[in-house]
Every structure is written in C-alpha cells, then in structure tokens.
Image (spheres, grey):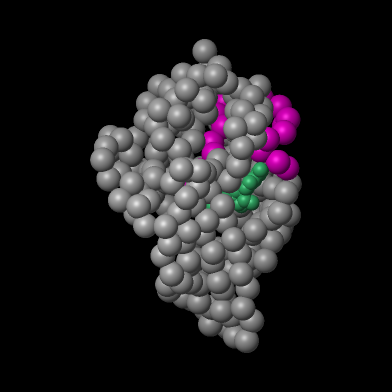
C-alpha cells in the first residue's frame, strides 16, 4: 500500500497538532482505560488522553509513527486491516482514517479485527458534502501556511469528486522553500445507512451517532459522521 503521508509527515504536526474538538469528544465518551487508536498518525489523539489511560496507537506510516514515538508513548507500525495487539476496552478510528480503506473487503477486514479487539468501537469520518459533490473539480487553492524549522511552508489543495464511486481525491501540494511535494489522498465517502449496515455485518450495532464533535445530531449539512458501535 502506498503511504501518502511518508513525504509530508514532517509538516503534519505544525498544521494539525492544535485540533482538539475531536479529542474532547473521544475522551469525554471513553468507556475504559485500555484504548487502541487506529490510523493514529503522529499521535495527536493518543496524546490527548489522560495519563491513567493505556493508549496504544497504530498507523501504517512509519514516518508518522516515528514522529509519534519521538514524543513518547506506545505506537505500532501496522495495518488497520490486519492487527492483533490484544484486548482493549475501546477502539477509536479518528479523523477520517477509516475512509482511507478503499474496498469493501478492506473495511470488512478492519471491522473484523476491531470486533476481536474490543466491544466498543468509535469511528469518525467526514460526512459527504452533498452540495459540493455536484461539482467534480475544485482547482488548487491555498489551504494552510506555517513555518517549520525556520522554513515557510504553504499547503494548497485541489479536489476531485467522484460521487458515484463515493470517492474524494485530494491533491495536496506543499511548497517549502524551493521544494514542492505532492501528496494524494483518496477517501471513501460513507452514508449513514452504509456505515450502519457495514457495522451490523461485522457484529456491531450503532448505539449512538453524531454529526459533529460537540454531540449534535446527524442532520442535513453536518460535517462529520461519528458513530459509537457496540459488539452484539
Ligand atoms: C487524516 S490522518 C489522521 C491522523 C491522526 N488520527 C490525526 O487525527 O491526526 C489518517 C491516518 O490514517 C493512516 N492510515 C491510512 N490507512 C491506514 C491503514 N490501512 N492502516 C493504518 N493506518 C492507516 C494514515 O497513515 C494517516 O496517518
């Protein structure tokens, strides 16, 4: 599997470390001390848990895990489709990481591994923007800028939308000094119904669902699809 984060891991924390609304939501609803975070990236969500929680983070990207380990903590380079690190109270798949799984077989394999690992599973993916989905392409636009190790870095984003395939292709370009690095992220877009039957097929039922990290309802125009699933 190609790792789209390998080239950009060095800039990830500068842009995303400050995001905390999802962490408050995960910590506030956490059901037990043993927590496994899939697609943990550089460990932003793992670090948000209080020290009495035993948090393990897993990610496919060795450079992202190296950045996480540099700050301390228990991190594993592994694929969320096939993992076995024992039994946990809860598995969390934050910030769209589950949407990186491209096929139904990949998603089923991941959910089967989750069902072996914990009785509670929390998934956070982006809600499709049904208005924008009618627009197949958004040209390159500025998305972020910052300074990393003394170098000005700018990220732009170009978006390709494939509504029938339920897919987004995000082309991010990082301009850092004289360097230009291109990273392409392909995300599956989930409907609520699809998320529910997929979880049910894997032996979970959806106990609660939210449309944002503040606990708002799943509603027209909401930007997240957050589900708390329980094993049958
Ligand atoms: C949008 S980032 C989120 C990172 C982190 N959870 C955060 O919120 O900052 C998505 C992460 O999912 C990871 N990922 C994608 N496919 C994966 C897979 N099959 N197994 C494990 N990690 C995966 C990527 O390497 C990346 O670090």
Q: Could you tell me which residue is drawn at 49 percent across and 32 percent down? A: 122
Q: Could you tell me which residue is drawn at 62 percent across and 86 percent down? A: 178
- Is residue 69 visible in the rendered image? The answer is no
Tell me residue 29's x, y (percent). Answer: 42, 32
Name the residue furthest top. 232
The quadrant in which residue 208 appears is: top left
Q: Is residue 183 magenta?
A: no
Read off the magenta span: 78-95
5 sits to left or right of 194: right
The quadrant in which residue 207 appears is: top left
Give the camera-side residue of 121 and 157. Answer: 157
Above-or-below relation of 144 to 231? below
Give the camera-side residue of 142 and 102. Answer: 102
Tell me residue 211's x, y (percent). Answer: 33, 39
Tell me residue 68's x, y (percent). Answer: 65, 55
- Is residue 162 visible in the rendered image? The answer is yes
- Magenta stretch: helix, strand or loop mostly: loop
Tell me residue 138's x, y (percent). Answer: 41, 65
The quadrant in which residue 114 appears is: top right
Q: Could you tell me which residue is drawn at 26 percent across and 40 percent down? A: 220
Instruction: Count numbered badges in the picture.
Output: 0
Above-or-below relation of 200 to 55? above
Q: Could you tell me which residue is drawn at 60 percent across and 41 percent down? A: 101
């Amino acid at each position: 599997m190609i790792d789209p984060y390998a080239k950009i891991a060095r800039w990830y924390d500068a842009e995303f470390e400050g995001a905390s609304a999802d962490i408050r939501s995960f910590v506030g609803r956490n059901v037990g001390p043993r927590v496994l975070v899939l697609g943990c990236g550089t460990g932003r969500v793992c670090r948000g848990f209080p020290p009495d929680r035993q948090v393990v983070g897993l990610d496919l990207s060795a450079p992202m895990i190296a950045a996480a380990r540099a700050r301390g903590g228990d991190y594993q380079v592994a694929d969320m489709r096939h993992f076995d690190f024992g039994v946990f109270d809860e598995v969390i798949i934050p910030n769209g990481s589950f949407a990186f799984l491209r096929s139904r077989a990949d998603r089923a394999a991941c959910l089967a591994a989750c069902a072996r690992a914990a009785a509670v599973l929390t998934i956070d993916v982006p809600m499709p923007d049904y208005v924008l989905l009618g627009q197949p392409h958004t040209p390159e636009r500025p998305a972020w800028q910052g300074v990393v190790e003394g170098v000005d870095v700018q990220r732009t984003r170009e978006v390709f939308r494939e509504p029938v395939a339920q897919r987004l292709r995000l082309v991010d370009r990082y301009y850092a000094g004289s360097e230009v690095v291109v990273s392409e992220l392909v995300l599956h877009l989930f409907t609520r119904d699809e998320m529910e039957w997929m979880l049910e097929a894997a032996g979970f039922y959806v106990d609660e669902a939210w449309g944002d990290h503040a606990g708002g309802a799943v509603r027209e125009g909401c930007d997240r699809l957050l589900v708390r699933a329980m094993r049958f």
